[in-house]
């Protein structure tokens, strides 16, 4: 097993969040609820990149910033109608998911 860090993002509606993250190329891996009607905890993945989306109160705070290093920032920028900004380390865009979580997405330069 490879060690890794998996950010947990708070969402109010896991199903809606999964649909939004699919636009970034993520795919739902699994979902857990302790019982019907209780909050969902979902894992999504884009290749080796994983995020947990949690409806549980207190698991994470809105306005969290996560950096995603990708190979295709141009495709993502086009999907979301965003302009790419150049930084010394990458070409980047900034997005907010429907719950206010911030995503900085970049393709390294060089």
Image (cartoon, rainbow, N blue to C red):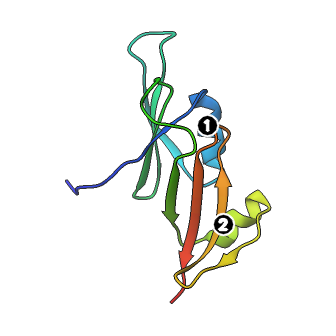
Q: Secondary structure at mark 2?
A: strand
Give the labeled residue for mark 2.
Answer: 93
Position of residue 97 measured from the top left corner of the image (x, y, whole percent):
65, 45
In the picture as drawn, the residue positioned furthest to the left comes out as: 1
- Verify CB contact (< 8 Å) between mark 2 and mark 1: no
In the picture as drawn, the residue positioned furthest to the bottom comes out as: 110
Q: Quadrant of residue 106?
A: bottom right
Q: Who's the residue at 42% across and 19% down the image?
A: 33
Position of residue 12 measured from the top left corner of the image (x, y, whole percent):
59, 27
Q: Where is 88 relative to 26, above or below?
A: below
- In terms of sequence position, does the residue under pointer 2 or pointer 1 come before the other? 1
Compare residues 13 and 89 and report the one nearer the observer. Answer: 89
Compare residues 48 and 69 and report the one nearer the observer. Answer: 69
Q: Who's the residue at 51% across and 62% down the image?
A: 68
Compare residues 22 and 57 and report the one nearer the observer. Answer: 57
Instruction: Give the Cα separation between the discs numbered 2 and 1.
Output: 19 Å
Relative to 4, 42 lies left or right: right
Relative to 60, 16 lies left or right: right
Q: What crowding class fits label 2: few (fewer than 14 Cα within 10 Å), some (14-19), or many (20 or more)?
A: many
Q: Which mark is residue 35?
A: none
In the picture as drawn, the residue positioned furthest to the right comes out as: 81
Q: What crowding class fits label 1: few (fewer than 14 Cα within 10 Å), some (14-19), or many (20 or more)?
A: some
Q: Who's the residue at 46% across and 33% down the image?
A: 42
Q: Secondary structure at mark 1?
A: helix
Q: Which mark is residue 17?
A: 1
Count the labels in the image.
Answer: 2
Q: Where is 34 relative to 80, above or below?
A: above
């Amino acid at each position: 097993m490879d060690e890794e860090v998996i950010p947990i993002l708070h969402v109010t509606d896991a199903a809606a969040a999964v649909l939004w993250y699919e636009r970034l190329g993520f795919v739902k891996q699994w979902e857990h609820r302790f019982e019907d009607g209780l909050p969902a905890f979902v894992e999504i993945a884009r290749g080796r990149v994983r995020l947990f989306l949690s409806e549980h109160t207190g698991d994470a705070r809105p306005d969290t910033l996560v950096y995603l290093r990708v190979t295709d920032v141009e495709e993502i920028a086009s999907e979301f109608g965003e302009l790419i900004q150049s930084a010394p380390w990458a070409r980047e865009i900034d997005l907010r998911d429907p719950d206010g979580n911030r995503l900085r997405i970049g393709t390294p330069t060089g």
